[in-house]
Amino acid sequence: MARITQQKKEENLAKYNALIVKIFLAEGWESVTYDRLAKETGLRKSTLQGYYPSNREFAMALQGKILPIVMSCLDFSSREAFIQSWEKGLTEKEFSMVIRMFVANAAKTESNPSTQRGVLKLIEIVSEHLPNENAREIIDLVMGKSVMTLLFDRKSGV
């Protein structure tokens, strides 16, 4: 079997990463599986494992993609505006998918370090924009609201 060049492997990885992001934003993280990627790409799962040795590596595809989605929905002009914009964001599909992934990941025995870094970065950003507020408390509040919205409100973006 012919081996592919490093450049071709990088091109393929970029294409597969884009597919992962597309599936995630449309259907949620639970839809990003080897089976689904194999179906979409026409590749064998073993071929995909050459790019993503375990399904935890699928998260690499999201690097640099999540924060802009979250930030585009948020209003940092005040604590109240931030909370209201977060609640509104939960009615939007992409924002809702990101928050759903954060919540699901937090519930796991061993959460993904990328998710932890993302939430810490968000706390840092809130702290920068709202220096007179307790950023951790605000994120605790909106994450709690997110859990309740995802549990009980069918108007969330999914």
Image (cartoon, grey):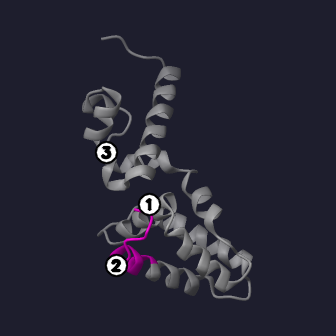
Query: How far across and how far down the image is residue 18, in percent?
Result: 49, 39
- Residue 72 - label: none
Is residue 131 left or right of 68 when viewed as pictured?
Answer: right
Foreground disc of the pair 3, 1 = 1
Circle 3 residues within 10 Å: few <14, some 14–19, many ≥20: few
Is residue 34 left or right of 120 when viewed as pictured?
Answer: left
Q: Amino acid under label 3? A: Ser
Q: Could you tell me which residue is drawn at 35 percent across and 11 percent down?
A: 2
Image height of 120 relative to 36, above or below: below
Q: Amino acid under label 2? A: Phe
Judge by depth and name the residue closer to the eye, 6 or 139. Answer: 139
- Say which element carries label 3: loop
Residue under label 2, please give it: 152
- Circles 1 and 2 in contact, beta carbons < 8 Å: no
Foreground disc of the pair 1, 2 = 2
Residue under label 3, please give it: 54
Foreground disc of the pair 3, 2 = 2
Question: Upstream in the sequence, badge 3 or badge 1?
Answer: 3
Image height of 151 relative to 52, above or below: below
Query: How far across and how far down the image is residue 3, in percent?
Result: 38, 15
Question: Upstream in the sequence, badge 1 or badge 2?
Answer: 1
Residue under label 1, please give it: 97
- Circles 3 and 1 in contact, beta carbons < 8 Å: no
- State how far apart marks 3 and 2 are (Cα): 33 Å
**Residue at the extreme top of the image, as rendered:** 2
Asked whether residue 148 is drawn in magenta, I would say yes
- Circles 3 and 2 in contact, beta carbons < 8 Å: no
Asked whether residue 152 is drawn in magenta, I would say yes
- What span is in magenta? 146-158
